[in-house]
Image (spheres, helix red, strand yellow):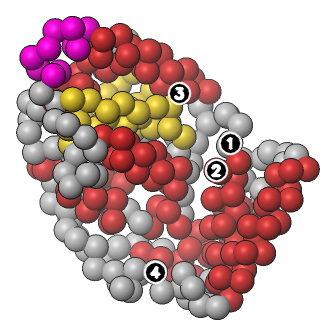
Amino acid sequence: MKKILTIIGSFQKEGAGMEAVQLFQKNFDEQEYEFEMIRLSECNIQYCRGCTACFKHQSGCPIQDDVPNIIEKMVGADGIIWSTPVYGMNVSGVLKTLIDRTSMMLHRPVLYGKQAFVIATADVGGTGLAVKYLKYMNNAYGMASSGGVGIYSHRIKTDREYQNRLTVQLKKEATKFKRALAIDGRARPSLMQILRFTGWKTKNRLSKDAYPGDYDYWQRMGWFEMPYYTPIKLNVFQKIVVRFVTRRTEKIVSKGMGLDQGKG
């Protein structure tokens, strides 16, 4: 049975995002998929303090709140659904705070191989920016994005024709998501995913003294000797681009750039 974690970034329990999530989940057989939902509005999520302790030490973040439990559930899931309203042309504040607190998972991508889907709701505009941002973060986490939808929050509740079109769209997206889950992390990574892996690998190798926790994690995973999280063969073009990104990252890190991330 596949486990899917839905993370709700809205304070509205019966809002448009919740309705969209329910429409999406209707396409999944309860005998094959297990859903769990986290409402961030009901969680204790404190702000990131920029201490970088999570990068330096294996013990992780010193803040005592609900974030470690949320991370544990994310790691234990096969797929993640993000649902957020658009505030200020991007994700909600509570969701952004969670993302800030999980920055360690960008340095140590424990979510690699998982699948993610994005739902963003707004009265007028901004859903495209929110979906794009969360897809970018999925990639940064090491996850793959099967898709994402932007939804007009007022129309999902009042416009029957819009509801019908959305139902059809979400059914198609659910099919893609299920197909991606079935691959179970064996999908060929995109060039962008390979390059992101290369950048972090190079930085963590050179930042051993600054962030020993990150270095020890990558060393333990055996990733310093690999072209990606899983064994793959690079083609000629990919090898050329990987070498360029490696040299570029080495120059940046050698100048001290990137070593003080989070101290601003």
The local secondary structure at tag 4 comes to loop
Q: Which residue is mark 1?
A: 189
* One can see residue 7 in this view: no
| Residue 218 screen position, x and y as percent | 64, 67
The answer to whether marks 2 and 3 mark residues whose Cβ atoms lie closer than 8 Å is: no
| 4 or 1: tag closer to the N-terminus | 1
Q: How far, Cα to Cα, is label 2 from label 3?
A: 18 Å
User: Is residue 133 part of the magenta span, yes or no?
Assistant: no
Q: How far, Cα to Cα, is label 2 from label 4?
A: 21 Å
Q: Which residue is mark 2?
A: 193
The answer to whether marks 2 and 1 mark residues whose Cβ atoms lie closer than 8 Å is: yes
Q: Which residue is mark 4?
A: 261
The residue sitting at the front extreme is: 124
Q: Quadrant of residue 252?
A: bottom right
| Range shown magenta | 155-164
- Say what amino acid the circle numbered 1 marks: Pro
| Residue 45 screen position, x and y as percent | 20, 62
- The relative height of residue 28 versus residue 60 in the rendered view (above or below) is above
Compared across the picture, whether 259 is left or right of 12 comes to right
- Say what amino acid the circle numbered 3 marks: Leu
The structure residue drawn at horizontal position 28% and vertical position 79%, both measured from the top left corner, is 49
Label 2 Cα neighbours within 10 Å, binned few <14 / some 14-19 / many ≥20: some
The answer to whether marks 2 and 4 mark residues whose Cβ atoms lie closer than 8 Å is: no
